[in-house]
Amino acid sequence: MLANMNHEIYQMVSQTKLLPLYTATDLSCLNLLEEILIKHDVRLIEVTFRSEQALEAMRILAKSKELVVGAGTVRTLQQAKDAVANGARFIVSPALVPEVVEYCIEQGIPVFPGTATPSDIQKATEYGINVVKFFPADIYGGLKAIQALHGPFYDVKFLPTGGINADNYQAYLAHPAVVSVGGSFIISEKLIQQDQGMTADRVLGELVSRL
Ligand code: 3PG
């Protein structure tokens, strides 16, 4: 059994409650990113494979002794391997990708496969995974869907992403089956670039203060 809540990274995810999803195109923002996350005690970051700079950003951020860096949008085994080689300590995928999941299990790396349906969740549990990403949460029924899925999958925890925002994240987090929420609303390169991080700092501070 790999993915259970006893692993320190799952515990961090469940304690932090917010998993920032970050796409890096401008590596000069990473210093401020790190500073803002640490200031607000959000010590996890998911760097997505949605830009050319993804691996470099993971490598740079992973040097921080204070952050735990993961890779997001992991759709292939090669991406998973490259991410781990560049310091990623957990893997998030938009779908359940068998070879990615199997690799993570072999390597003992926490993995959050993307699920949206009972069949997806069933597959994840067959791998021994009991914490899954629920994506895209808003399109697939949001909290109502989580409540319905929580019936048969009472022993599974969800990390909803996709359409989570400052107005609804507290409602998601109030559900006992929700371990944490993820998304680009937590921090983004665009916000960091706006005014040397002042807005990003304020936005994250407000989100954290309402947890
Ligand atoms: C994801 O991959 O988790 C989503 O693209 C995040 O969606 P968001 O941008 O609506 O937070």
Image (cartoon, rainbow, N blue to C red):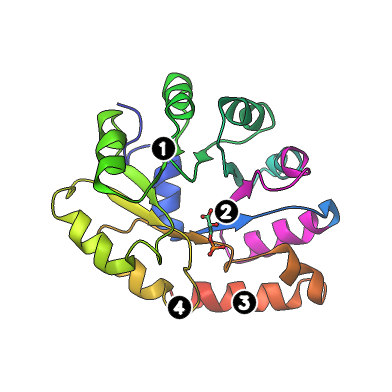
Query: Mark 3 near mark 1, Cβ–Cβ under 8 Å?
Result: no
State which tag comes first along the sequence, 3 or 2.
2
Tell me the residue at 68%/73% (across/down): 201
- Please identify, in this view, whether the residue under mark 1 or under mark 2 is nearer the observer: 1
Q: x, y percentage for residue 34?
A: 71, 56
Residue 106 place in picture, x, y as percent: 44, 19
Q: What range is drawn magenta here?
A: 29-56
Q: Earlier in the sequence, mark 3 or mark 1?
A: 1
Q: Residues within 10 Å of mark 2 (few under 14, many from 20)?
A: many
Q: Quadrant of residue 63?
A: top right
Check disc 2 and report the residue beneath it: 43
Question: Mark 1 touching mark 4, by CB under 8 A?
Answer: no
Ligand 1 quadrant? Answer: bottom right
Q: Going 64% across and 48% down the picture, which residue do you hit?
A: 47
Which residue does the numbered mark 4 point to in the structure image?
210
What's the distance in space between the residues labelled 3 and 1, CA to CA?
A: 31 Å
Element class at badge 4: loop
Residue found at x 61% / y 43%: 69
User: How far from the left and from the top, in percent, is residue 111?
Assistant: 45, 36
The earlier-in-sequence mark between 4 and 2 is 2
Task: Give the residue pinned by disc 1.
Answer: 96
Q: Is mark 4 within 8 Å of ligand 1?
A: no
Would you name the residue on which mark 3 appears?
A: 203
| Comes first in the chain, label 1 or label 4 | 1
Q: Amino acid at mark 1?
A: Leu
Q: Are marks 3 and 4 in contact (CB under 8 Å)?
A: no
